[in-house]
Amino acid sequence: MEYAEIEGVEKPVSRLFFGTCTRDMKAGKNVNDLLDRAFELGINAFDTARCYGDAEKSLGMWLTARNNRDKVVLQAKGAINGFMWRSRIKESCIRSDLKKSLENMHTDYADIYLLHRDDPRVPVGTVIEILNALKSEGKVRAFGGSNWRCERIEQANEYAYAHNLTPMTVSSPNFCLAEQIKDPWGGGLVTVTGTKNAHEREFYKRTGMALTAYSCLGNGLFSGRFSGNDYNAAKKALNLQARIAFLCFTNLQRLRRAETLAREKNVTSAQIAMAWLTTRGMNVFPIAGISNAAHAESCVAAFDVSLTEKESDWLNLDSDER
C-alpha cells in the first residue's frame, strides 16, 4: 500500500480509503474481521459520514475493540442537507453532527472533517471561522469540503490566508474513469469528470490538494458483474443511483476498453479503473466501499497495476491509440 501526507494530518495516510457506506456497516453490524483484514493490507484511512446509517457505530466498535485509534486516519463528514434539501451549513448543525460522529466512533477528534455539502449563500469566511474554531478546540485536525466547487474552496482559502487562519486541505468530489452524467440525488453533488469540469481538475493539479474521490468505480460499473457490451445486463445489475449517474453508452465504451486492458495485464477491469485514477496528475485518494476481504485485497492490488500515458488517455476516450 502506498502512503502520502495530507496537510494537517499527523500520520501517513494510505492512498486508499476504506469507504463505510456499505450495507453491513450502515446497519451497524460487527465487521471487525473485515476491518482487521483491510488494516492488515495497509489501509489505515477510513471514510464515513453522519448520513451513512450506523456506519460510524460499526467503525467505532472496531476502534474500541482493537484500541488502535492512534494508528487510524478518520475522515468524517457532516452538515448534509436536511429535510427538503434545507441547508445545514451553520455552526449549530456542524457542531451537532461532529459531536454525534465522535461519540459514535468513541474518539475525541476527527483526523479529517468535511462539510458534506456546500451552500453558496453562506460566506466562506463564516465557514472558515467555524472550522478553525473546531481545530483550535482539538476536535478536528484537517478539514475541507465534500461536493464543494473549486471556486468556493479557493475563496475560502484566500479568506484563511488573509486572516492568518488554517485553510481547507482536503476535498471530496466524485472522480472516476466513468463520467458522472447526472446527479443521482437531484442536486448538490460535485464531479470533476467530463470535459466541462476540466477547470476543476486543473485546480487540483495546480494546488496538489488532497482529493478523496467517492464513487471512484462508478457505483459498480466496473464491478465485473456484466460486460461493457451488454447494456441490458448493466441496467439490471446497477442500482437506481448508479444507472442515473453512470449508465450510458459512452461509459460502457470506457468499460470495454478497461476489459481489454484487464485481459492483457491479467487483472480485473475494476483494478484498471482504480489504477487510472492515479494517472491524471492529481493528488487522488480513492474511496472504495469495501464489503468483503476479497474486494479489499483486489483494491489494494490495483496500486501495483501500471498504465502508460497512452493507455490512460485511451481508457478515457481521449485517444484511439494506445
Image (cartoon, grey):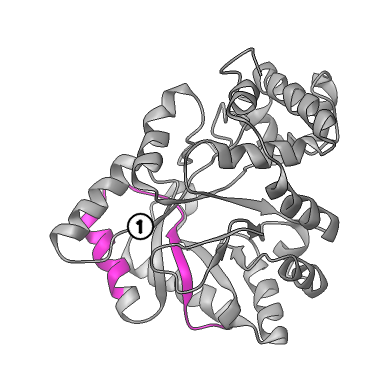
* Residue 189, magenta (yes or no): no
Question: Is the residue marked by circle 1 packed among few (<14), some (14-19), or many (20+) residues within 10 Å?
Answer: many
Q: Name the residue under label 1.
A: 89
The answer to which quarter of the image holds residue 262 is top right
Q: x%, y% of residue 21? A: 67, 57
The three-letter code of the residue at mark 1 reads Ile
* Residue 119, magenta (yes or no): yes
Residue at 67% in and 85% down:
64
Residue 239 appears in the picture as rendered = no
Toward the viewer: 310 or 149?
310
Give, as a single range, the part of the protein colored magenta.
107-133
Q: In this view, does 128 lie to the left or right of 65?
A: left
The mark tally for this picture is: 1
The quadrant in which the C terminus is found is top right
Residue at 43% in and 72% down:
96
Toward the viewer: 302 or 18?
302
Above or below, 29 against 16 in this view is below
Toward the viewer: 105 or 213?
213
